[in-house]
Amino acid sequence: MEQLLNDFSPGLFIMQSILMLAVIFLMVKFAWKPIVSSLEEREEGIKKALESAEEAKAEMENISSANEQLLKEAREEREKLMKEARETKAKMIADAEEAAQEESAKIIAKAKVSIELEKKEALEQIKKEAAKLSVALAEKILQEELSSASKSAEHVDKLLKEVTLKS
Amino acid sequence: MPIFAEILTKGPLLKGAQMKSRNQFLKSLFFSLALAFSSASLWANDPVTSKEPSHEDSADQSVSTEEQISEYIAHHIKDAHDFHLFSYNDASGHRKHIGFPLPVIVYTSQGFRFFMSSEFHHDDSGHQVVERDGVSLVKYHEKIYELNAGEHAVSFDEAHHPTNAHEVLDLSITKSVFGFLLVSLLMLIAFRSLANQYKKRAVPTGFGRVLEPLVLYVRDEIARPNIGEKHYKRFTGFLLTVFFFIWTSNLLGLTPLGFNITGQLAVTFSLALFTYLITQFSGNKEYWKHIFWMPGVPAPMKVILAPIELLGTLTKPFSLMIRLFANISAGHIVVMSLISIAIIMKSSMGAVGATALSFALSFFLTLIELLVAFLQAYIFTMLSALFIGMAVQEHDHH
């Protein structure tokens, strides 16, 4: 211990303290301050870059999800349109069928009516023809059988009755 | 190997710094390892240095006996007034010293005196008297003494203390101060260039790429966790400076240049004083309250705890001072002792065997010292940060 104290040099202590103070001052001013501030700046920069990358990523995710949404909507819209179109088509076909049926029914009815009319006319015609025929027949009969007129007339009347009954 | 044996047999000197456990398990594990390293070493004691300075008078100043080696080592770990690399005997038997002198600045009874240390002519026994404007100065065991008025030669008592001279305030650029300046210059150049690099690019290249993680390490692993997110920025400058100063000094001490800056008690005392003053001046109300009137304990205990806590503020930086000094000094002593095996064991093992053994052991130990160099810088900075952290931390949980 005595040796230690003996070896302790106050002069060296003073020199060391003064120089150390100067060196701390110089190092802080010319080395540590600029170095530490540059390091902090760099760290800040890295932090910011990471943050903005994160943000960009989130934004990208947003955009893609919006895209997805749009796509989905479009698909739904298309589905809807398709469905509508299909319905319209079906309806149109059904309508057309109905109309056609109605038309055909109408045509058929008309045809029936006209057929009826034709038939009636034809019958009338036939009646008339028959009457003419019977008249002509009667004439002929009358001409041929004037003698037995009464028998013939009875027979003609009987025939005529039969003819009219038949219609 | 008396010194080495002494180091091995002496018990641990240091008590582990009281540390509140607030770090994770891994960290405390590393820390206790580090403390184990620190407390296992020790400084050399007297018997080495209180040797008779007789051999210095003899013409042959070679270092070959055990005593001479012990003295050589003891001399090395002390501060020196000149920069000495090595010595040898030339063909005519003269001792040649390779190195250069450093300026001596002393405050004597007649004011400041400046001269180069070469004026002492490598004399360390107090025989070479330097006359400077009416002041006679001698150098004895790397201390400079002023001879009392009228005296022309220094005389010693039995304990080898000069009787007719007194010490002067020695503000010389000693080897340690020179080393400090060198380390500061290296640090300034290296970190200034790193700082300049950031003006051009975000990520430094070359040597800066090595330095940057170290700066980040001190900031993020030492300052930030120990002081706390809120206050650490104020202290990073000090902690970074101290860390790199101690580390570079320690590494410089492992080079053959023979610096022993952080092995000087004055240097570690100064460093610890910085930590002490910063801790006390940045201490908040809570810190002082915990020292003088510990909350949460009964009143009589508060009275007893106050002086203990007050003493604790002193023992913390004291342990910082001793730990760094002891580790670095011990490291130097052990490495030099192992190197000297080559000389001492030459007679019993032969030149090749002794050199091989010495090389193997000292190589291994130098590798460990490389680790210790970093470890001690880490521990000093880390504990400083911890002490500062205790002083500024806010105790909202009480």
Image (spheres, rainbow, N blue to C red):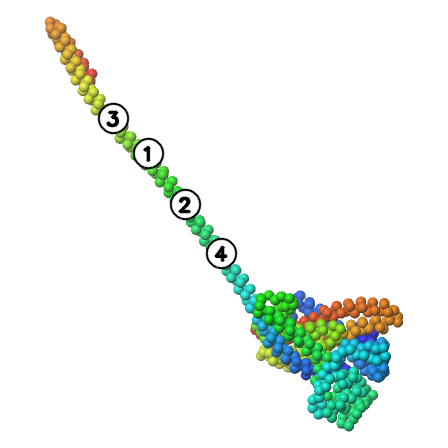
**Residue B258 located left or right of residue A39:** right
Contact, CB < 8 Å: mark 3 with mark 2? Answer: no
Disc 3/disc 4 C-alpha distance (Å)? 76 Å
- Label 3 sits on residue: A112
Badge 1 sits on which subunit?
A: A
Amino acid at pointer 1: Glu
Quarter in which the N terminus of chain B is drawn: bottom right
Mark 3–mark 1 distance (CA, rounded to whole Å)? 22 Å
Q: CA distance from mark 4 to mark 1?
A: 55 Å
Kindly identify which residue carries mark 1.
A97
Check the residue under mark 3 and report the chain it is in: A
**Res B34 → quadrant:** bottom right
Of the pair B217 and A134, the residue shown nearer to us: B217
In the picture, residue B263 is in which quadrant? bottom right
- Who comes first in sequence, dot 3 or dot 4? 4
Q: Residue at x 80, y 72 (%)?
A: B339
SS at badge 4: helix
* Number of the front mark, 4 or 1: 4
Residue B62: mark: none
Q: Which residue is at the front of the view, B284 or A154? A: B284
Left or right of residue A162: residue B362:
right
Specify whether disc 4 shares its chain with disc 1. yes
Q: Which residue is mark 2?
A: A78
Please name the residue shown 68% across and 83% down the image.
A14
Residue lying at the far top in this picture: please name it: A147
- Secondary structure, mark 3, is helix
Position in image of residue B209 (x %, y %): 63, 66
Q: Is residue B381 visible?
A: no
Q: Quadrant of the C terminus of chain B?
A: bottom right
Three-letter amino acid code at the position of disc 2: Arg
Residue of label 4? A60
Q: Residue A100, percent across and down?
A: 30, 33
